[in-house]
Amino acid sequence: MRVLVVEDTRALAEQLQAALITAGFAVDLAPDGEEGRFLGETEPYDAVVLDLGLPKLDGLSVLRAWRGGGRAMPVLILTARDGWAEKVDGLNAGADDYLAKPFAMAELIARVNALIRRAHGHATPEILAGRLRIDTARKQVALDGAPVRLTAMEYNLLACLAQHLGQPVSKTALTESLYAQDFDRDSNTLEVIVGRLRRKLGEGLIETIRGQGYRLAGAP
Ligand code: CA
């Protein structure tokens, strides 16, 4: 899962980045509205955290540009405390949720997770795929009821496949979901992670679809 953070206050941006990485996300940072708009228009994100008060281009204009251009990723806006008018404007411009500064990082992470879950049509944090149960809130996986220990990368890849249960996900989409923009991407790494997941979960769960990528079997 890959998240864009558009925030000009450097200390807060770095705090957000650290908290999101700890929660298992790949994170790109944009320090102003112009770069944020550009990244949101050109890169695939599972969610965006967007500050409204930004240099070069304000957050509301960034959001309107994205929505006007058909970009539908979930967006959580950061507003000033007591800025109810900002919240209303933000929601009207296409924001999916908001948090007023200052906020607790744990609440931000929980809201980002909920936005991503709902964007994929899952009302609850639990995804069932055959013998597999994935708790996306706690990031825990069980096979036939027994917990399976996964690394962060393994979990993220599995969660990305689970969000598209029964459909193939391309290697490009998986790689883009797993790594931040400035990360040195290597598609072999993807195959290594899939290999480790197959050893832990059994060979049949993750199918290779020739020319299309991977698919998590077990759709009801
Ligand atoms: Ca700001």
Image: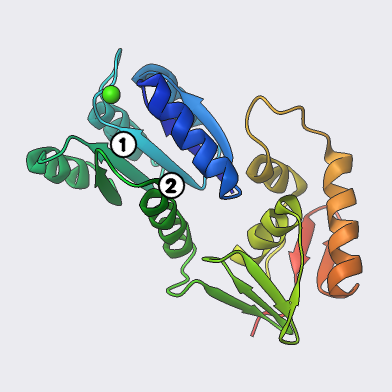
Mark found first going from the N terminus, 1 or 2: 1
Q: CA distance from mark 1 to mark 2?
A: 13 Å
Say left or right for 111 vs 156: left
Outermost residue to the top: 56
- In the rendered structure, which amino acid carries the disc numbered 1? Gly
List x then y, in percent, for residue 145. 71, 86
List x then y, in percent, for residue 43. 55, 33
- In the rendered structure, which amino acid carries the disc numbered 2? Met
Say left or right for 110 vs 82: right
How many labels were placed on the picture?
2
Q: For residue 183, which quarter of the picture?
A: top right
Query: Which numbered mark, 1 or 2, is in the foreground of this view?
Result: 2
Answer yes or no: disc 2 within 8 Å of ligand 1.
Answer: no
| Residue located 39% across and 29% down the image | 12
| Residue located 38% across and 49% down the image | 108
Q: Secondary structure at mark 1?
A: helix
Q: Which mark is residue 73?
A: 2
Residue 120 versus residue 99 in the image, above or below: below
Say left or right for 25 vs 157: left
Quadrant containing ligand 1 = top left
